[in-house]
Image (spheres, rainbow, N blue to C red):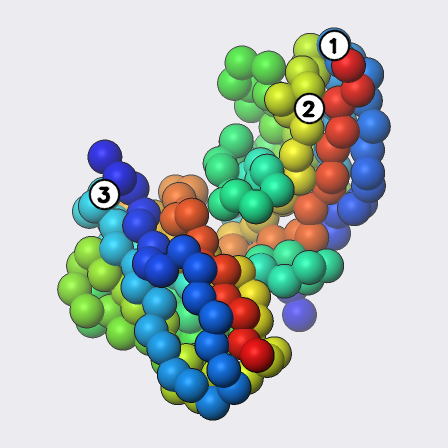
């Protein structure tokens, strides 16, 4: 059971380039999330999807777009990467809203030059 | 602005002693509280979650919640060197807003052999 799988694990981009971070979960979870983690800032919510077909902004959505492709997959896109988007990106999922905990993928380490 | 506060540490505890990690939160509407452990360069790993006032025990770990004081803590008994990590406190965002978690910045715990 793989849980939450993120690809790629590492990526280096130049300013202005675009890329999509992929996330897939095999736990049949309804809700999926994207966070970024920066030194001294903790994890911050970028976007989330409460269920297939819905997406909503989190705390720091600017510069990002998301797609909930199906129940398993939730992608994060940087249309024009900026150095301020250098971070570690984590995808998470959970069965439903409420008290259930979120389970995290291994992360994508992204550097924007 | 929802806030979750943790002492960043480092908190140094002798092996075999009890480690006590504390967290306060600002939003009285929060209902679910989570402790994640994060090793350097790794993803957050769920340790405990609690949503009722009082104590919840799981092996060497005990989570304590006091909603009146907006305080949640994690006790680690018989601390082991493998417990050395950063511990993240996370609080759910109540309905009506982003359905994700608000994280504290984490407490760096060091267990001294």
- For residue A51, the mark is none
Quarter of the image with the C terminus of chain B is top right
- Tell me how far mark 1 sits from mark 2, CA to CA: 13 Å
Question: Is residue B99 found left or right of B111 in the rendered image?
Answer: left
Chain containing mark 3: A
Q: Position of residue B89 (x, y in %)?
A: 63, 44
- Tell me how far mark 1 sits from mark 3, CA to CA: 36 Å
Residue named by callout 2: B75
Question: Is residue A92 found left or right of A43 in the rendered image?
Answer: left
Crowd rating for badge 3 (residues with CA inside 10 Å; few <14, some 14–19, many 20+): some
From this view, report whether residue A98 is shown above or below residue B21: below
Name the foreground residue: A8 vs B26: A8
| In front: label 3 or label 2 | 3
Label 3 element class = loop
Residue B17 visible to an observer of this rendering: yes
Name the foreground residue: B89 vs A1: A1
Residue contact at pointers 3 and 2, CB within 8 angstroms: no
Label 1 element class = loop
Chain containing mark 1: B
* Tags 1 and 2 on a common chain: yes
Residue contact at pointers 1 and 2, CB within 8 angstroms: no
- For residue B16, the mark is 1
Residue named by callout 3: A27
- Tell me how far mark 3 sits from mark 2, CA to CA: 30 Å
Identify which residue is drawn at 49% across, 37% down. B45
* Tags 1 and 3 on a common chain: no
């Amino acid at each position: 059971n793989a849980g939450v799988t993120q690809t790629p694990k590492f990526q280096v981009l130049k300013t202005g380039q675009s890329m999509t971070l992929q996330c897939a979960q095999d736990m049949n979870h309804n809700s999926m999330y994207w966070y970024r983690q920066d030194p001294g800032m903790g994890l911050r919510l970028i976007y989330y999807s409460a269920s297939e077909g819905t997406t909503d902004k989190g705390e720091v959505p600017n510069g990002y777009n998301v797609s909930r492709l199906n129940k398993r997959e939730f992608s994060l896109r940087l249309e024009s990467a900026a150095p301020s988007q250098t971070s570690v990106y984590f995808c998470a999922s959970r069965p439903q809203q409420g008290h259930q905990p979120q389970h995290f993928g291994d992360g994508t380490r992204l550097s924007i030059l | 602005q929802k806030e979750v506060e943790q002492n960043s540490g480092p908190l140094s505890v002798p092996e075999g002693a009890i480690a006590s990690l504390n967290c306060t939160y600002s939003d009285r509407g929060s209902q679910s509280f989570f402790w994640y452990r994060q090793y350097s360069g790794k993803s957050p790993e769920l340790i405990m979650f609690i949503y009722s006032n009082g104590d919840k025990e799981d092996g060497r770990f005990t989570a304590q919640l006091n909603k009146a004081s907006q305080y949640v803590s994690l006790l680690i008994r018989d601390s082991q060197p493998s417990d050395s990590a950063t511990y993240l406190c996370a609080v759910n965002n109540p309905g009506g807003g982003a359905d994700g978690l608000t994280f504290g910045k984490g407490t760096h715990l060091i267990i001294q052999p």
